Structures are given as C-alpha cells and as structure tokens.
Image (spheres, rainbow, N blue to C red):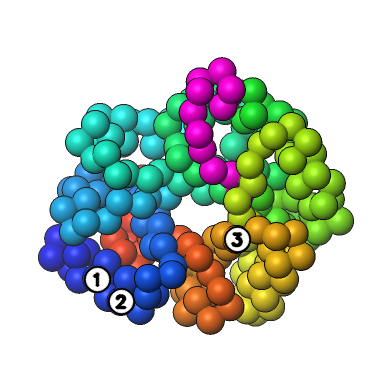
Amino acid sequence: MTKIADNIAALKKQMGSKTTLVAVSKQQPEDRIDAALAAGQRVFGENRVQEAEERWISRRPSYADLSLHLIGPLQTNKVRDAVALFDVIETLDRVKLADAIAAEITAQGRKISCYVQVNTGDEEQKAGVSLGELPMLLEHCRAIGLAVDGLMCIPPVDEPSGLHFALLKKLSQDHGLKNLSMGMSDDFEKALRLGATHVRIGTGVFGNREKA
C-alpha cells in the first residue's frame, strides 16, 4: 500500500498545481482505495454508477472534500442516481442526456459540473458527441441552463493521442471552456504538455486491476 502513496506523490509532483489527478478506482479492491484515501487522494473516477454507489456511499460521510467523477457512459435511467452521487459527470454526449441531467439537478437541488465527451476519432463504437454536433449540444446545454465546464476525450487506440489532445484543446478554446479531461496512464505526459486540467489514471496509481 506504500507503493500507492508513492505513486500518487510522484504523479502529483509531475503534474504540478494546475492539473488534477483523477484516480480511476473502478474494479479496485477496497484496501487499495483506502490506501489512496490515506495518502490524501480525494478525486476519483468511476465508470459505472452502481459500482460507485457500492464503493463510495459509505465512505462519503468521512471525506467532506471527496470529489467523484463519472467517466463511463451514462444511460438516462441511471441519471437520478448519478446526479445524487457524482460531483462531475464527464460523459455528457447527447441532448436527451443533457435534459435528464438538468431535470435531476433541479429536482435534487444539487450543483454538479458537466463535461462533454467528444468522439474525436469519429469511432462508431465509442461514446461521445461527434465533432459536427458539438456546437449544437453546447448551445442546447446553455439554453436549458446546464453548466458545461469542460471537454473530455478518449483517443483511438491506433492513432497518436497527441493529435486528439491538441484537437480537444482547440475545441475548448473555440467554445470558451476551461477544463480538459484527457490522458490516462500510458499517455498523460502528452496530455499535460497540451494543457490537460484533469488526467484519469488507474494503473499508474493502483497497479493492474484484479481480474473480475
């Protein structure tokens, strides 16, 4: 468990004060999560709402400064639970989802942050709004009063990630958005050089996930 603390310290030193480490805790055993918390890590990323509930609802009262990011696709039938638990939803990618999130934020009286996930590689199998539909989605979010604070992307595995990070940065500048969630364990250094404000790292923090 000392290794996890060392990993977190090294990553934060490398990132500097302008970039937030989002520790991807999906499928990690409980002792590793507790080790990260003991090391002072407070920002975590989860892919699935139900798994996150099982892990974090009991822990949340003990950590007032905890910040939970949803970094996996969100179905509309899970929006109520997601808005209740997460502080940041990074995977907003369609009008219907925007409407559902906005309605739940109002109903629950919560204040959460949303990022739009952009499908920078135009991959059919991947979540994210297309480049052509991004302006319309952002306009719709503003029209319904849903605050969008940044953009997120997951580059294609067979293309240079730096090209996609540079594109996401340009899109954020074009649309006046301040946050850029990009970069994972294998490519976060490139993301840092291109202005990432948040990097999502699992293996680099916790080591390899245990087999389900």
Question: Which residue is most to the top?
Answer: 107
**Mark toward the viewer: 3 or 2:** 3
Number of other residues with Cα within 10 Å of mark 1, as a class: few under 14, some 14 to 19, many 20 or more:
some
Secondary structure beneath dot 3 equals loop
Q: Which mark is residue 178?
A: 3
Residue 107 at x, y percent in the picture:
56, 18
Q: Amino acid at mark 1?
A: Ala
Q: Amino acid at mark 2?
A: Lys
* Mark 1 vs 3, N-terminal side: 1
Magenta-tinted stretch: 104-115
Residue 5 visible? The answer is yes
Secondary structure beneath dot 2 equals helix
Q: Residue at x 39, y 37 (%)?
A: 52
Say if mark 2 contacts mark 1, CB within 8 Å.
Answer: yes
Q: Which mark is residue 179?
A: none
Give the residue at mark 2: 13
Q: Residue at x 20, y 36 (%)?
A: 62
Quarter of the view holding residue 202: bottom left
Magenta stretch: residue 112 in it?
A: yes
Q: Amino acid at mark 3?
A: Lys
Say if mark 3 contacts mark 2, CB within 8 Å.
Answer: no
Give the residue at mark 1: 9
Secondary structure beneath dot 1 equals helix
